[in-house]
Amino acid sequence: MKVAAEFSAITFFFRLLFSGLTNMRDTADPRHLARVIIVQKMFERQFVTEDIGKGYSGEYSEKELAEIGNFKRVDKGLAKKLLKGIRENYKGADKLIEKYATEWPLSQIPKVDLQILRLAIYEGFLSKTTPEKVAIDEAIELAKELGGPNSAKFVNGVLGNLISKINNDRRRKKTAE
């Protein structure tokens, strides 16, 4: 019962929060809105289970999505694809987060920041659904909108370290050829 009450409170909080996003970044962008939904779903999952890869009955239906403020224009295909991909590959993303956020064990990273990092790493680096720089820019915007006062700096730092390492590896490979 306690978990259900906490879950309901979290859902209520996010519906309030996300219904107020109309004054933030261009909410007409269906891909951005999909990312907001994904961060919300992953955040909720982490309160229900530490293994976010396991399914549970808390998924949004099409009707529930339509009821959340201006989310009628969400790119639902992208949201479902990314949510499924993150759930199946979050352990790979977590390894990269641990590698590039060396001062922060996963358990100490704020839950919203962790979900934003998982999304960006999956979308831009693991699945390559989106160009790396776009995934980083989107993650920073999400951190500004949804995270704490230092979230954008933290997310930028972790993803900046990751892209620097990748770019250095690419330069070395190109030089070796």
Image (tube, rainbow, N blue to C red):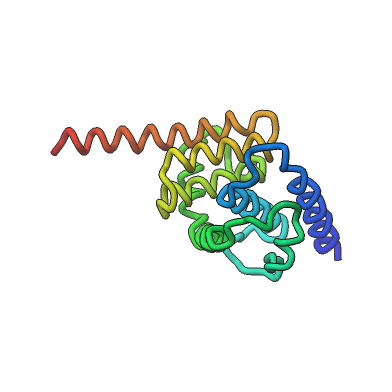
User: Front-most of 99 and 20?
Assistant: 20
Where residue 172 sits, quadrant-wise, is: top left
User: Front-most of 128 and 157?
Assistant: 128
Q: Residue at x 42, y 55 (%)?
A: 127
**Residue 160: image location, x then y, percent:** 46, 32
Where residue 173 sits, quadrant-wise, is: top left
**Residue 63: image location, x then y, percent:** 73, 68
Q: Quadrant of the N terminus?
A: bottom right
Q: Residue at x 58, y 32 (%)?
A: 154
Q: Is residue 38 left or right of residue 121?
A: right
Q: Quadrant of the C terminus?
A: top left
Q: Residue at x 70, y 34 (%)?
A: 148
Q: Count all numbered tags in the image, as a single digit.
A: 0
Q: Is residue 115 visible in the rendered structure shown here?
A: no
Q: Is residue 133 visible in the rendered structure shown here?
A: yes
The answer to whether 80 is drawn above or below residue 23 in the figure is below
Q: Is residue 59 left or right of residue 85?
A: right
User: Front-most of 71 and 8?
Assistant: 71
**Residue 71: image location, x then y, percent:** 69, 54
Q: Residue at x 62, y 69 (%)?
A: 55
